[in-house]
Amino acid sequence: MRSCRTTDERLFAFVDGLDSGLDDHVAGCDECQQFLAELWSGELAGDLSEPVMRTIRFDEFLASAARLGIDIAVAMARALVEYGPQSDIGEAGE
Ligand SMILES: [Zn+2]
């Protein structure tokens, strides 16, 4: 669990646009940005059961990230370095 205590569930809700209350936090939290980058880097590289939905979510997430001023490219690069595109992120998925 990340030290800021934001749960995976809240971050998934944020990604889905259900929890806009996290906007300010995510914009300033390296751990949450890293989680989101890991989530997307893993999902984009993995076996997607809902590729269309996930693509929509990703687009929305990028729009949110851009609006918040998050440098998602940096966050994703950081996650890729740390976890790698082939890593198992099952803990985050279920
Ligand atoms: Zn956080």
Image: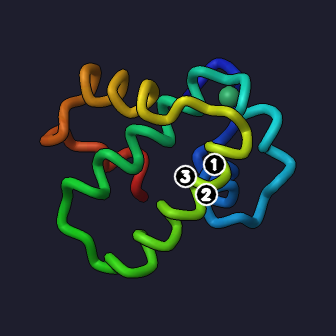
Quadrant in which the N terminus is drawn:
top right
Residue 15 disc label? 2
CA neighbours of label 1 inside 10 A, class few (<14), some (14 to 19), many (20+): many
The earlier-in-sequence mark between 3 and 2 is 2
How far apart marks 3 and 1 lie (CA) works out to: 14 Å
Left of 23 or right of it: where is 42? left
In three-dimensional space, the C-alpha distance between marks 2 and 1, rounded to whole angstroms, equals 6 Å
Instruction: State yes or no: discs 2 and 1 in contact (Cβ < 8 Å).
Output: yes
Q: Position of residue 88 (x, y in %)?
A: 21, 43
Which residue is at a point 73% across and 39% down the rendered structure image? 68
- Quarter of image, res 20: bottom right
The one nearer the camera, 5 or 55, is 55
User: What element does badge 2 sit on?
Assistant: helix
Q: Give coordinates of residue 63: x percent, y percent.
A: 62, 55
Query: Of callouts 3 and 1, which one flags the residue occurring earlier in the amino acid sequence?
Result: 1
Name the colour scheme.
rainbow
Q: Amino acid at mark 3?
A: Leu
Residue at left offset 67%, top offset 51%: 64
- What label sits on residue 62 in the rendered view? 3
Indicate whether 60 appears above or below 68.
below
View extreme (left): residue:
86
